[in-house]
Image (tube, rainbow, N blue to C red):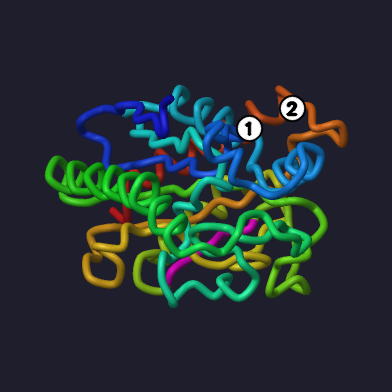
Amino acid sequence: MNTRTLIAGDTSSPVILHVPHASRVIPPEIRSSLTVTDDQLAAELDEITDAHTDVIAQHAAQSVTPRPWTLRNDLSRLVIDPERFPDEREELNVVGRGAVYTRTCNGEVLRNADSAVRDALLDNYFHPYAAALSDLVTDRIAATGRAVIIDVHSYPTLPSAYELHPDGQRPALCIGTDPNHTPPWLIEAASAAFSPLGDIDTDSPFEGTYVPLDRYRTDLRTASVMIELRRDCYIEETGQLVDIAAENLGAMLGRLVEAADRGSR
């Protein structure tokens, strides 16, 4: 079973499309350790999967030259969440939604809070995934002198029960930033690329963006921005993808890729 997929881009591109939450796949041995029923699991996956963000990223990658690199997580975030801190820095630990989830969106028990199980999941899935993305960033810096991560996500129209900051605005596009790794030009480029949406905010309802931990706050050659698309912009209430909307969003994301490739020059 593939745990991740790396799609090579052009050697001259510093841009990495990161798609961490698009999959619903849970290996059988991990499914058997989850305490929820099949119906509960399906509802949880519906709520927390960033459905079809891989399709949008693919449209973007195919629309531009030079082509960016893409790293896609092929397992559900219910296995591990590669975007979380694996230690006490993660604020969502308080609701059981750290690197290894122990609670569902609604606060029900997802898996037993067993430290040995948690450590095994981190060793088998979290750390290898983090290393793969770190290696890709290292490769892009070696080739181009810099790396630009575009972190591709989506979120539901209504707040999930686990959210710590549910009162924030929920625009069509939330641009997530990091004070050290998201330069102003990259925020401006994201706003310009997605300007047809009209409804754009920064760090609301979610803030931050992915940076490999071995470069976090230490290597400013690594830039990153998070793209959070509200799901009703491209998914019907039935969960069906609206193809033309996905293509249009892919084209907007492609414009951001082009801007990131040019950088601040």
Say left or right for 14 vs 182: left
**Residue that numbered label 1 is attached to:** 52
Give neighbour class at mark 2: few <14, some 14-19, many 20+ (Cα, 10 Å). Answer: some
Q: Is residue 162 magenta?
A: no
Image quarter (top left, top right, bottom left or bottom right) of the N terminus = top left
Q: Secondary structure at mark 2?
A: loop
Q: Residue furthest right?
A: 237
Q: Main secondary structure of the magenta part?
A: strand
Give neighbour class at mark 1: few <14, some 14-19, many 20+ (Cα, 10 Å). Answer: many
Q: Is residue 177 magenta?
A: yes
Whether residues under marks 2 and 1 lie with C-beta atoms below 8 angstroms apart, the answer is: yes
Q: Quadrant for residue 182, please give it.
A: bottom left
In the rendered image of this protein, does residue 145 appear above or below residue 28? Answer: below
Residue under the point 61% across and 76% down: 94
Position of residue 43 measured from the top left corner of the image (x, y, whole percent)? 79, 43
Mark identifier at residue 241: 2
Q: Secondary structure at mark 1?
A: loop
Q: Amino acid at mark 1?
A: His
